[in-house]
Image: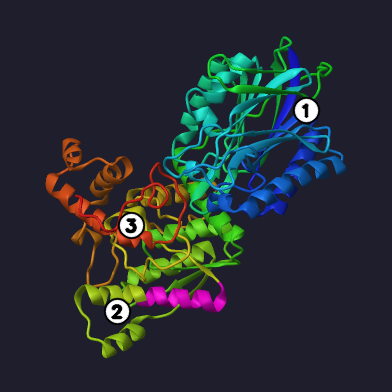
Amino acid sequence: MAQLRMAMAQVNPTVGDLEGNCGIVVEYARRAAGAGAHLVVFPEMVVTGYPVEDLALRKSFVAASIEATHRLAERLADEGLGELPTVVGFLGRCEDAEPRFGQPAGAPQNALALLHQGRVKVVSAKHHLPNYGVFDEFRYFVPGRTLPVVRVHGVDAALVICEDLWQEGGPVATVRDAGAGLLVVLNGSPYEHDKDDERLDLCRRRAREAGAALAYVNTVGGQDELVFDGDSIVVDAEGEVLARGPRFEEALLVTDLELPVPSEPEPRGTAATTGIGIERTVLSEEPVPAYDPRPGEIAQPMEDLAEVYTALVTGTRDYVRKNRFGSVILGLSGGIDSALTAAIATDALGPDPVHAVLMPSRHSSEHSVADAEELVRRQRINARTVAVGPMVDAFEEAVAVDGLAAENLQARVRGQLLMTLSNQEGHLVLTTGNKSELATGYSTLYGDSAGGYAPIKDAWKTLVWELARWRNAEAARRGETPPIPENSISKPPSAELRPDQLDTDSLPDYSVLDALLDDYVGTDLGRTELIAAGHDAELVDRVIRLADRAEYKRRQYPPGPKISKRNFGRDRRLPITNRWS
């Protein structure tokens, strides 16, 4: 057996910031070298950020990525890090691809590169291109055809990218044929609730299948609607966990491994079971002198509500930071949705950049105004009160409105006010609607749906309450003041757009509604299946009608962090004009 100290850099790149991302690689490579690592590995497409979407179809961007990767190799050498083998993900190109119908122009590839001694020594591309959920990689990339196996200090390490691990067969199945003792996987694996257990089970299973230790390095941070949670993992060939990174935090995970010394293979070959070409590169034959290994770090797991809340905070923080907004603004009603949104914003950014506007109308209750004012005191955010009654009155003097039009007018005046303050003062408007409202169309277009980012867009109303209670309990556990007034959590929800209005006037209890919506939206159950699952037939018909009619609203809703397996946006795409029911 031979020893190898491997470092996995769980970092937070920004899409398109090639110079900044390469700076992150240099910083963490320096830290890895300082920790005595023999190999350092970074996530999928760390040079460009991930996902790049249609940027992959711009030849200039592909060329810039390739050039940046070569410059990065030179920079590492110039800074005394050239002897440390460094594996990065980048946007590459298949140089020998023949143009054909259906293939993306320019043959871009989701690729990895091994940098050593100032040069790009190995390049390989992702084989399995996911085309489900949030992924459109068939649209963007040409698949790879080979498995790189790199000898580092007498140990053979195979290198693959993300989906290659999730799919059966392909390059991972080739690892055993190649005789590699270590399988390294570069990932850009987005967060979903409960995905950590699925991810660990997969790593254990694939390690046993490959007969090799497995190192899974994942990115961290927010990118538009996606949130990456890190959770990098190292397991041995039996699937035993040796190290595990923290969730939602940048980290350098350093792990000492004992790996088999391979017998001398042919320089190149083809795997007998998969037909995939094996490309071998020798960096160093001599094993490292024996040393005392240090125990691997294993981060403590997060409880369910903690991980969901942290995902929302992470997504909000990075959307604001990466898009260079200095501050945010939101309407504060005293209700649970705006209260939770304010708490997320404050936890993401601190209180100083958070601005709230209290916008009472003739239908606003005294307790709602008092609850909003109490939240401002608890969270120490900036706040102002602007009564919208006179603005609504002015509109009603010009145009006669009543009923739903009058209710929506109040919401639109509030939305207009927030957008005006955004333009005047440079804030990003946070929209406060939840997934239940978005599913059923209970939001006013150009009113409460107006904004630039929607932190709780993917949270059912019942989850909003759970998160609020969890956040308050967490504050109490720390000896802090709970950020959300109890009355905002316990009172019946209401839009307060007409006298004595309650959500239950037009919607069933949210525990009933959300269970039905989750089955319809989350798993695409049809009417017959929903009724068979125990949902009331009349309610099924009504909810399907509401959800299907609201598609046009959802298309115009701001982005927000994805936390479920199926969010509104990247995951679920239905035609607006649609007579199928």
Q: x and y percent of residue 411 in the render?
A: 33, 72
Question: Outermost residue, bottom direction?
Answer: 397
Which residue is disc 3 drawn over? 438
Q: Is residue 356 left or right of residue 259?
A: left
Q: Quadrant of residue 98?
A: top right
Disc 2 vs disc 1: which is toward the camera?
1
- Give the magenta-colored segment's residue range: 413-426
Residue 50: x and y in percent read 58, 46
Calculate the distance from the C-alpha at mark 1 to the C-alpha at mark 3: 50 Å
Q: Residues within 10 Å of mark 1 (few under 14, many from 20)?
A: many
Q: Is residue 101 left or right of residue 38?
A: left
> Image height check: is 550 above or below 143?
below
Q: Nearer the viewer, mark 3 or mark 2?
A: 3
One can see residue 238 in this view: yes
- In the structure shown, which secondary structural element does the residue marked by tag 1 occupy? loop
Q: Nearer the viewer, residue 574 or 211?
A: 574
Residue type (three-letter) at the residue carrying disc 2:
Arg
Residue at mark 2: 362
Mark 2 → mark 1, Cα distance in angstroms: 68 Å
Q: Position of residue 171 (x, y in %)?
A: 56, 24
| Amino acid found under the numbered disc labelled 3 | Leu
Secondary structure found at label 3: helix
Residue positioned 59% across, 15% down in the render = 176
Mark 2 surroundings within 10 Å by alpha-carbon count, few (fewer than 14), some (14 through 19), many (20 or more): some
Instruction: Please state if 96 lies on the left or on the right of 467 as rendered.
Output: right
From the viewer's perspective, tell me whether residue 580 is left or right of residue 573. left
Residue type at mark 1 is: His
